[in-house]
Image (tube, rainbow, N blue to C red):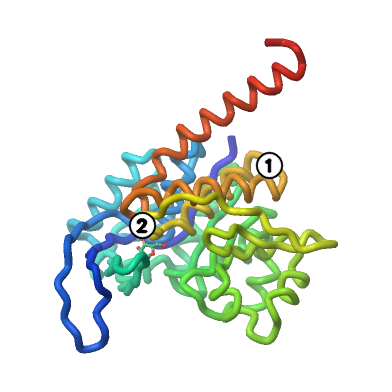
Amino acid sequence: MSQIVVVGSCSMDLVVTSNKRPNAGETVLGESFKTVPGGKGANQAVASARLGADVYMVGRVGDDAYGQDIVNNLQAQGVRTTYMKSVTEMESGTAHIILAEGDNSIVVVKGANNEVTPDYVKEALSTIDDIGMVLIQQEIPEETVEAVCAICSENEIPVILNPAPARKVTQQILDQAAYITPNEHEAALMFDRLTIEEALRQYPNKLLITEGKNGVRYFDGSKEILVPGYPVKAVDTTGAGDTFNGALAVALTEGKPLYDALAFANFAASISVTKFGAQGACRQEKNWRERNEKKRHLKQSHRQGTR
Ligand code: RIB
């Protein structure tokens, strides 16, 4: 099977839960504090690996305890870490998360993620064989996102750009990425001169706008399509978008048609919100996948009378 390469951020998430989100200048009491692995890149890599893909993470950590824990966690999840070099002069990336009133607020300090430079990534991409898909997000320098899109377009490697956190991107990036997966807020910022409908029409089968539990919307060349989400009881939505992107990469690399790949990614994301932590519930996706594949196989055999 060809490899999925995730270029992006790896961080430690410092998560506080509280009944109330503090206003500016206010102090509130929290319920709990936990330290769990996160970072959009690492979350996506872990989701893809848990779904059975062969995954490389291309990122950087500080030469500190968090950095060691981040790399150990990736390895424990079956992600290849050859291109996870540590930098001495910077601390590992951290995300400071408040879970309150049913949603999260996050402040990211990029730290060593700023050292995921174009040169660092070029070296990795030129030495990994048989790359089927590259996944990239925006917690690393913008010039790296540009360089990755350019290298991949030259080598005909499809790129999924998950433009989170939101920032404006160049036309070159929009043209060279094979798939772009903003949520509604990110899409509004990226395409501020267009309505969402116009943006979807401009990038058929490429711009895939996620709408949380509603699902994901795209334009198939003749009509707008909503691939519905799956209703679940959400415990923690942190990282749901990352699981969506990791699962989408797996499904597309396996050759699933776009609609089916999106339905698969929606399901994986819906399961991911049922447990605490950005990587917390993904483990269950594999079981879900095995169960569903068995069911589908039984149905097919039944139809063909081979049971
Ligand atoms: O997408 C969720 C991730 O965003 C968290 O794990 C946190 O690290 C932030 O970067």
Residue at image position (55%, 68%) is: 183
Q: Is residue 229 left or right of residue 84?
A: right
Using the image as rendered, state which of residue 129 and residue 222 is in the foreground: 222
Cβ of mark 1 under 8 A from ligand 1: no
Using the image as rendered, state which of residue 188 and residue 248 is in the foreground: 188
How much space separates mark 2 and mark 1, taking CA atoms?
A: 29 Å
Q: Is residue 224 left or right of residue 111?
A: right
Residue 122 in the image: x percent, y percent? 51, 60
Dot 2: element: loop
Residue 70 in the image: x percent, y percent? 28, 52
Residue at image position (49%, 54%) is: 6
Q: Amino acid under label 1?
A: Lys
Residue 47 in the image: x percent, y percent? 45, 46
The quarter of the rendering in which ligand 1 is drawn is bottom left
Identify the disc placed on residue 236.
2
Q: Earlier in the sequence, mark 2 or mark 1?
A: 2
Q: Is there any visible trace of residue 97 in the rendered image?
A: no
Residue at image position (45%, 46%) is: 271
Which residue does the numbered mark 1 point to in the structure image?
256
